[in-house]
Amino acid sequence: GVPRSHNMWMATGRCSAAAGDIGPQDVLLNPFPMVNMAAVGGFLFPAAIHGCPIVLHHPLDPALFLRQMQDERVTFTIAPPALLNQLAKAPEMWAQFDFSALRRIGSGSAPLAPWMIETFDRDYGKPIVNFYGSNEGISLFATPESAPEPAVRAAMFRRPDPGADIQTLVADPESGEILSQPGDRGELLIAGATVFDGYFQHDNDGVFSANGYFRSGDLVEICGEGGNYYRIVGRCTDIINRGGMKISPTEIDLALEKHPQLAEAAVCAYPDERLGEKICACIVPRPESEPPTLEDLQAYLLQQGFARFKLPERLTVLAQLPRNPLGKVQRFTLHEQVIEQLKEETS
């Protein structure tokens, strides 16, 4: 449980409204259950602050979702990356609807693809806002104003300015040393008006740093002009350790999503006696395409500039990727599925 006060929600609502440029004139379409950060902080409180209506939609039904965007004259919504990727690849589907009222679309809960953002900016005229948030109170975003370039907006979040509702630091996950130089990688720490006080009926040991910042568990890289941006490179616990080489799975996910034969893709670790862990590519082929082979994917990633030690060494073909209600891939479920497959193969 994540107890939060009204003041915390008001601060979160202000952040979300600023990112979506939400005002009294807007109509919001909420595709999430009204029990978590995405719905309460992203829709309910911005609407309460500005007095604008919310159209509800859950669970996600893409066809109905698109009709509601048209029929309700929605001006702002948040959509899962997988749906936006699908729309970016299918301009004929986008052209079936009248989205003239729509001003911008939010997304998040998983890394965004630069090519998708570029397609929406250039071809559809609808800018994408990249949200990075959590129930505990993380509230960062990349907008067309703070990150005009699609490649930057897809992966980087501007560090909050002094005096903002939230403040951030980056620390070495093991030593706790505060890092500050461009290129440094460490755990994101966050404090301020949006951040909760601790988990319900939990001793909260290790949840906060010595100086009171929430330890997000997310691994970020300090980057961008003057080191004023963060790039999410994965979870501290998601990092794949292949023979001592630390590999972020998210960068491989993003590269595979661009493969023309794939509708969805994500990688996960699986155990190896010699190296400790290796990488498995879990893919969902496009309906009209044959699934690529492992060798095809390896060659594709090499063409994208990936080092050989980052290449998947196993392939799993699925009907769909396991996702939570916010559309985020559940990598631990992929890991469990691959483990079961390995057991079946050796039994």
Image (cartoon, helix red, strand yellow):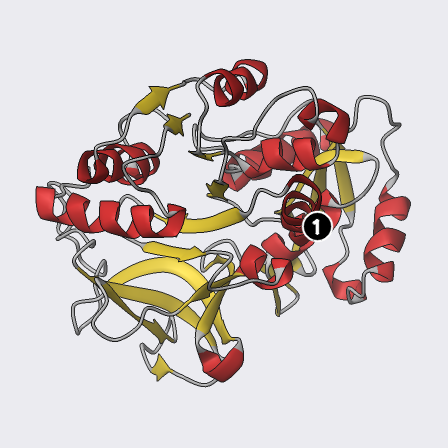
The spot of residue 53 in percent (x, y) is 29, 25
> In which image quadrant can residue 314 be found?
top right
Q: Above or below — where is 262 with respect to 176?
A: above
Q: Nearer the viewer, residue 170 or 269?
A: 170
Q: Residues within 10 Å of mark 1 (few under 14, many from 20)?
A: some
Q: Secondary structure at mark 1?
A: helix
Q: Above or below — where is 318 with respect to 225?
A: above
The spot of residue 20 in percent (x, y) is 39, 46
Question: Seen in the image, is 56 located left or right of residue 310?
Answer: left
Residue under the image location 45 percent in, 30 percent down: 324
Does residue 272 appear in this view?
no
Task: Name the residue that disc number 1 marks.
Answer: 115
Q: Above or below — where is 111 with respect to 346?
A: below
Q: Nearer the viewer, residue 1 or 8?
A: 8
Question: Label 1 amino acid?
Answer: Trp
> In which image quadrant can residue 22 be found?
top left
Q: Nearer the viewer, residue 34 or 117?
A: 117
Residue under the image location 52 percent in, 75 percent down: 223
Q: Nearer the viewer, residue 148 or 273?
A: 148
Question: Seen in the image, is 209 located left or right of residue 4?
Answer: right
Q: Above or below — where is 143 with respect to 159?
A: above
> In which image quadrant can residue 164 be found?
bottom left
Q: Quadrant of the C terminus?
A: top right
Residue under the image location 66 percent in, 39 percent down: 124
Does residue 232 appear in this view?
yes
